[in-house]
Image (cartoon, coloured by chain):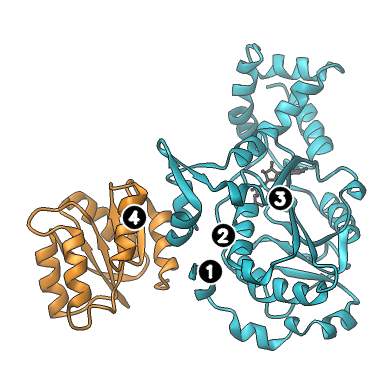
Chain colours: A cyan, B orange
Amino acid sequence: MTPGGYEYLRGMLHEKSGLALTGDKQYLIESRLIPVARRHGHAGLDELVRAARNPGSEALRADIVEAMTTNETFFFRDKTPFEHFDNLILPALLKARSNRRRLRIWCAAASTGQEPYSLAMMLDQNAHKLAGWNIEILATDISIEVLEKAKAGLYTQFEVQRGLPINYLMKYFKQVGDMWQIAPTIRQKVKFAPFNLLADYAALGSFDVVFCRNVLIYFDTETKRDVLARMAGSLAPDGYLLLGAAETMLGVSERFEGVAGYRGVHALKGQGDQAAAAPARQQPFQAEAGAGRLRAV
Amino acid sequence: MKSCLVVDDSAVIRKVARRILEDLDFTIEEAEDGKVALAKCRDSMPDAVLLDWNMPVMDGMQFLLALRKAEGGDKPKVVFCTTENDLDHIMKAIRSGANEYIMKPFDREIVEAKFQEVGLL
Ligand SMILES: C[S@@+](CC[C@H](N)C(=O)[O-])C[C@H]1O[C@@H](n2cnc3c(N)ncnc32)[C@H](O)[C@@H]1O
């Protein structure tokens, strides 16, 4: 590929999805985009770039953006965020919202659905506490392709064995050929929609919990800062934001602070009053936290 | 260090499982069928058993039922590891006292995830 072509793709990907390709990522571009070129009937990457530069090629550019996303995910990924959800976040919000009885959860980079479905299964485990509650899980991603897979809720044998306890498999999945499909009752709890994190969040409304895991790592500091600032605006004052295991707010946002004892869980700063009003943020619930909770079905 | 008994009539599978579990800091014993496995358990109960289903002499299910009746046999975490990959087999295994279930083919990540699930990692 010509240096000019590479620079064009780098700039275009950054502008459209926030993806920051640092250093020489020619190999990555080649392995991901040669199949796209083929699909669109182009002989090689230079032809693909030429076509993509055409102002009318919006669909082709979207295809390129999708092909460059990394969609790796699995059920109950890293486990502890889900335990924190169960032990800290849910009890605190059930208390704080006991009048309105409404919760809104956003999985902001949901990929093929394992993350929102893990939450939906956890909520189902808590059904006895949630009678009369209206709980919305909105799962979004920039990639249409992963959302289609997520909506179908069909997973390979390999996918259902990474992170999913066997009791959950028995309770919530059925076999379809050599695939496993998640139960309609769980699928109905999650609403999937395409959404670009670089877009305006205003129309989404306000959320009590945001899972934004393993997507900021692909962005540069500037983009991270922008996304987190706007996430702060989409979060209820006493809401929670969860980042991935390798992600930190350090040097990126001053709006949030980590919740002590609950790695990866962040709250908006200056919520001291709320924190006091929600004892779940303090010690007693921590004692309850344990690997066992997830397994009990 | 935790101990794991790998029960499978295939020497190749035992070797693959041994390599993965040794990397996860388990000491490994091997058995090629349920009968040999049961004798080893009576001798010394392991922390975990990775258990094939279809084996000559005594299969995995017969072994599991006998193990759970044996003295101290409630202690080991039993993780089935078998080509039987349908819900009926899975439910039967769990109801009979297995703790987790791996459907072959498996890899390092799956073994690690499942041993984490039973609380041994
Ligand atoms: C590695 S997956 C993370 C999945 C899940 N959150 C997890 O932690 O397992 C990252 C996802 O972010 C999506 N993504 C990348 N850039 C995005 C953007 N600008 N807007 C929305 N989603 C984006 C990708 O399509 C991909 O599915």
Q: Chain of mark 1?
A: A
Give the residue at the far front of this rendering.
A132
Label pair 2/1, CB-CB below 8 angstroms:
yes
Residue B113 image point, x, y percent = 44, 60
C-alpha gap between disc 2 and disc 1: 9 Å
C-alpha gap between disc 2 and disc 3: 16 Å
Q: Residues within 10 Å of mark 4 (few under 14, many from 20)?
A: many
Instruction: Return the mark for residue A153.
Output: none
Q: Give the labeled residue for mark 4.
A: B90
Q: Is residue A66 above or below residue A158?
A: above
C-alpha gap between disc 4 and disc 1: 19 Å
Label pair 3/4, CB-CB below 8 angstroms:
no
Q: Nearer the viewer, mark 4 or mark 1?
A: 4
Q: Give the labeled residue for mark 3.
A: A215
Q: Quadrant of the N terminus of chain A?
A: top right
Q: Secondary structure at mark 2?
A: loop
Q: Chain of mark 4?
A: B
